[in-house]
């Protein structure tokens, strides 16, 4: 199946005849869909075809980059107003469509009292926008407790 440079279907054609027609027009014969029955080929400039493919890939990559991972760090010792400011930042990140990782850092003796730290983290979670979904439950590891949330 051959398609000419303007997009019209020329119908089924032998491979040699299609190549000859492409050479006659000063263009290339490019196989578009090899798995189709019959295979689809197009008469066009290979440089133009390659440019269109690169443009399509760039567009796909740009769409995939929509959701980023943002991080907000909180501490056991933070005052209520500071936590509220960070909760507002989490809400802003989620409104932009980003995933947010909340990290409660624990230092020194704070690591021994993980129950209190989890309670403080749960208080912080109640401060953020109620329309959120917890992706990963609070996990203890590294320097503290981690969890991820995203807008519902």
Image (spheres, helix red, strand yellow):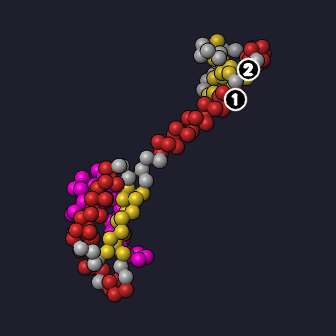
151 in magenta: yes
Residue at image point 61% right, 33% down: 53
Residue at label 2? Answer: 27
Magenta part of the chain = 125-152
Residue 91's tag is none
Residue 35 visible in the picture: no
Q: Is residue 12 above or below residue 82?
A: above
Quarter holding the N terminus is top right
Point 43% across, 53% down: residue: 68
The percent position of residue 113, horizontal first and vertical second, equals 29, 83
Residue 72 located left or right of residue 118: right
Q: Decide which of 18, 129 is in the foreground and name it.
A: 129
How many C-alpha atoms fall within 10 Å of the one at disc 1: few (<14), some, or many (≥20)? few
Query: How far across and how far down the image is residue 134, in percent?
Result: 31, 59
Residue at horizontal 61 percent and vertical 15 percent from the top: 6
Using the image, determine if residue 113 lies above or below residue 126: below
Residue bearing mark 1: 47
**Residue 67 coordinates in the image, percent (x, y):** 42, 50
> Dot 2: few (<14), some (14–19), or many (≥20) neighbours within 10 Å?
some
Relative to 151, 44 lies left or right: right
């Amino acid at each position: 199946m051959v398609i000419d440079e303007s997009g019209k279907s020329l119908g089924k054609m032998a491979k040699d005849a299609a190549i000859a027609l492409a050479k006659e027009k000063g263009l290339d014969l490019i196989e578009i869909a090899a798995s189709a029955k019959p295979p689809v080929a197009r008469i066009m400039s290979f440089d133009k075809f390659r440019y269109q493919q690169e443009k399509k890939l760039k567009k796909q990559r740009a769409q995939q980059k929509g959701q980023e991972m943002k991080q907000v760090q909180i501490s056991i010792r933070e005052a209520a107003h500071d936590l509220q400011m960070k909760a507002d930042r989490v809400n802003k990140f989620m409104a932009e469509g980003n995933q947010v990782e909340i990290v409660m850092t624990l230092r020194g003796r704070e690591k021994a009292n993980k129950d209190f730290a989890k309670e403080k983290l749960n208080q912080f979670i109640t401060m953020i926008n109620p329309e959120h979904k917890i992706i990963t439950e609070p996990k203890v590891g590294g320097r503290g407790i981690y969890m991820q949330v995203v807008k519902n």
